[in-house]
Amino acid sequence: MNGRTTAGTNLDTVRRHNLGTVLGIVHRGGPVARSALTQATGLNRSTIGALVAELVELGLVVEREPESSNRVGRPSPVIAPDGRVVALAVNPEVDAVTVGVVGLDAVVHRRVRYPTGHVPTAQEAAAIASAVIDGLRPDLGRASRVVGVGVAVPGLVREEDGVVRLAPHLEWAEEPFAAELAEATGYPVLAANDASLGANAERLFGAGRGASDLVYVNGGASGIGAGVIVGGSPLTGISGYAGELGHTLVNSSGVRCHCGAIGCLETEVSQRALLRALGLASADPDELSRVLAAAVGSGDAAVTAEVDRQVGYLATALRNATNVFDPERIVLGGFLGALHELAPERLPDLVAAQALAASAESLTITRSALGSDILMIGAAELAFAPLLAAPAA
């Protein structure tokens, strides 16, 4: 191979890398001045100009004039992600399958929750998701590109092929759900654990923004999971199964969990118990939060007692997470966020009283900033990953 060919290949590799870097900054940071891209990347203005022009041509970003300012000189153009580039997001649960359409600008354009009335099989969930996606065709018709589907699964998912190794509440084991959904929809599909995706979404776009070490704990109809970010990178474990905080011990005198152990967090802190105390059969996270707040505010003794009981056990689990991971921030999603919101000072106080003082002194515990959209955004980010890695592919 001659030197000229090698140099050309290397330059092309660098260009592709820089394209991904610029698109990633715009995608995760939102609209940004071209001059700020120059500062963030260390690349010169002409190189940034060429990269932005290529991303505009690819239909991935839009360039516009900035709003008027008092600064002297010509203002730098603003680069924004094109929200017409979308990903589909799917979250199968024990009582519903939720499908969303999420733009490259991290805006959830549509979210459809399809109640099932029973625990769906993997085949049923794939069929429901495919049918809902068909119903979203008018929305997708307005998109310039659909990059694929990301799936947030409440269970253990093998990273390499999207096989659901075990989702106990769904009663799925060794289910090739990603492959089934890809066949049903015709789109490429990637799948991962829901809490891990939620952690990434909060780190990039929500309450975890700016934190290099955080723990995201998600509570849903299918139990409790956690995603851990260490030094800015997801903690996955050797096969992608790390973060099962729902199966850590909080009550040695408790009941047996479906996993076989005694006293897991999931057995003591659950959405089902809250719904039972409220006299409800089901509720989405937003509705549950409203009803819980109303019941506690009205002095409902049974609901207040159940909330207090669950907060106590949750504090024990968060103490363990604090001592093990020494995070800067713990972010609570789903019904756990609703529990925290009822008394925002109580849970941090309980954790601080139990955890190692050195680990707890800089800890912040907060509710998810992305609310009901978190798993949609997290799953979409999974689908966007190949595009962000290789925009010109």
Image (cartoon, rainbow, N blue to C red):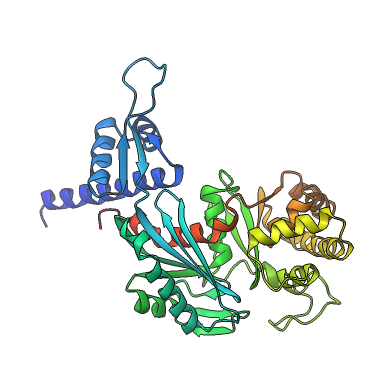
Pinpoint residue 118: horizontal percent, then vertical percent.
60, 82
The answer to whether 103 appears left or right of 114 in the picture is: left
Image quarter where the C terminus lies is bottom left
Q: What residue is shown at x 35% (from left), y 65% (from top)?
A: 137
Q: Quadrant of residue 281?
A: bottom right
Pinpoint residue 386: horizontal percent, then vertical percent.
35, 60
Pinpoint residue 389: horizontal percent, then vertical percent.
35, 55
Q: Quadrant of residue 373?
A: bottom right
Q: Nearer the viewer, residue 353 or 111?
A: 111
The answer to whether 270 appears left or right of 54 in the picture is: right
Q: What residue is shown at x 39% (from left), y 32% (from top)?
A: 36
Q: Is residue 3 above or below residue 226?
A: above
The answer to whether 22 appears left or right of 125 in the picture is: left
Q: Nearer the viewer, residue 1 or 343?
A: 343
Q: What residue is shown at x 35% (from left), y 74% (from top)?
A: 185
Image quarter where the N terminus lies is bottom left
Pinpoint residue 165: horizontal percent, then vertical percent.
53, 80
Q: Nearer the viewer, residue 157 or 367?
A: 367
Q: What residue is shown at x 39% (from left), y 78% (from top)?
A: 179
Q: How many marks?
A: 0
The answer to whether 91 appears left or right of 299 in the picture is: left
> Most extreme residue toward the top, as rendered?
72
Residue 82, visible in the rendered structure? yes
Q: Quadrant of residue 162?
A: bottom left
Residue 92, visible in the rendered structure? no
Q: Is residue 206 above or below residue 375?
A: above
